Amino acid sequence: MKVKNWILGLFMATVLLLGALASVIIYVDPYFHYHKPNANLYYELNNERSQNDGIIKRFDYQAMIIGTSMAENFKASEAEELWGYDFIKVPFAGGTYKEQNDNIANAIKYNPDLKMVIRPLDYAYIMDEPDRVRDDLGTYPDYLYDKNPFNDVKYVFNKQILFDICLPMFDNARAGEAGGVTSFDDYANWMEDAEFGADVVLGDRTEYKQPEEIQPFAKRIKKMVKDNITENVVDLAKANPDVEFYYYLTPYSVAWWGSQTELGTVDRWLAAEQYAIELMLECDNIHLFSFNNEFDITTNLDNYSDECHHGDWINSQILAMLYAGTNQLTKDNYKDYLSVESDFYKNYDYSSLLK
């Protein structure tokens, strides 16, 4: 009998301990899985794939900025000043078109007040498998995204979340730190550690070689573009005509085009871009832009920290151009845009970058 009572007591103690652990995490809820932030605690936004789903489902907003690292330097306050909506910023560094589209779909599902979406369409992801997700970036916290309450044990019984996040938040509150949340201007912004300029972008490159062969826009790749753009861009817009989608093709630096010239892929990229544009222009509530012909931006390597990523001042310019309608693509002008783009990047003297 004593052994039985001892086992029962140990079991009850374990249950109470686990219950206490779970109750703390549920109360604080640093990933907003169950509720909005508690007003008396300060929440640091620093884990995109764990926190964005909760932000999308629990926060109050009428508009959102989403995208890869190309979107991380946007300042939501600038968008709010232009459009007059409350914005959230939920970037997914390295996120594919599918990952971003799935999260936009969730925003539409959980927020009937959603009016607009700003999203950079990474040029390098146009030719992508429609179902690809970035499982190379660490374990994806699927338990935060699905509706299965049983796998929430990975969240509510997580020692790291308890000791590294929740308890320090209580300590900070006792020390007098005001409640709140990291601003959507600062969230995921990588400017503090970034370096810019030709030396950084070009590295140890000493020449641009002639391509060994020109890569064609094969039927297999065309189908991939169609499936990717249709499933992860167009279908959602068509299904939600009351939401305005401000999408733009990311303006990579001229050095990126130099690398593609060397690889013999420029014609393929331009053909893929044209096809993607034509698919998106069939949707009236997609406001499609491209800034590849803003040559003052793309040829100035001081704007870039590598061949693709630009500084936050370019994000600010992009917001202003989106609002003003500058460089918007239409059925009437997109072929002229493509002609200028093609002529410029196919005839640019890339060796001049190395001088």
Image (cartoon, rainbow, N blue to C red):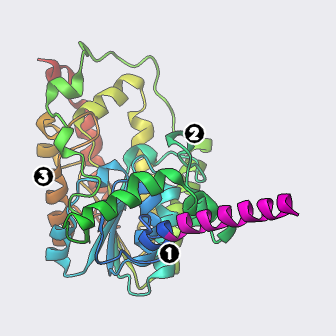
Q: Which mark is residue 34?
A: 1
Q: Which residues are magenta?
A: 1-23
Residue type highlighted by circle 3: Trp
State yes or no: residue 106 in magenta. Answer: no
The answer to whether residue 267 is seen in the rendering is yes
Q: Residue at x 55, y 60 (%)?
A: 155
Number of other residues with Cα within 10 Å of mark 3, as a class: few under 14, some 14 to 19, many 20 or more: few
Q: Are marks 1 and 3 in contact (CB under 8 Å)?
A: no
Depth check, mark 1 against mark 2: the one in front is: 1
Kindly indicate the quadrant of the structure image that contains residue 315.
bottom left
Reading the chain from its start, which is encountered first: label 1 or label 2? 1
Question: For this view, does 139 lie left or right of residue 87?
Answer: right
Reading the chain from its start, which is encountered first: label 1 or label 3? 1
Measuring from the top left, give residue 76's x and y in whole percent: 22, 67
Question: For this view, does 67 lie left or right of residue 213?
Answer: left
Kindly indicate the quadrant of the structure image that contains residue 235.
bottom right
The answer to whether residue 247 is seen in the rendering is no
State yes or no: residue 16 in magenta. Answer: yes
Q: Is residue 133 above or below residue 185?
A: above
Distance from the alpha carbon under mark 1 to that under mark 3: 36 Å
Q: Nearer the viewer, residue 327 or 139?
A: 139
Question: For this view, does 197 lie left or right of residue 264?
Answer: left
Task: Determine which residue is flagged by label 3.
Answer: 313
Measuring from the top left, give residue 278's x and y in whole percent: 44, 61
Per the image, label 2 sits on a secondary structure element best described as: loop
Q: Main secondary structure of the magenta part?
A: helix
Q: Is residue 38 above or below residue 17?
A: below
Measuring from the top left, give residue 339's x and y in whole percent: 29, 48
Q: Nearer the viewer, residue 136 or 270?
A: 136
Measuring from the top left, give residue 56's x and y in whole percent: 42, 72
Depth check, mark 3 against mark 2: the one in front is: 3
Q: Which mark is residue 218?
A: 2
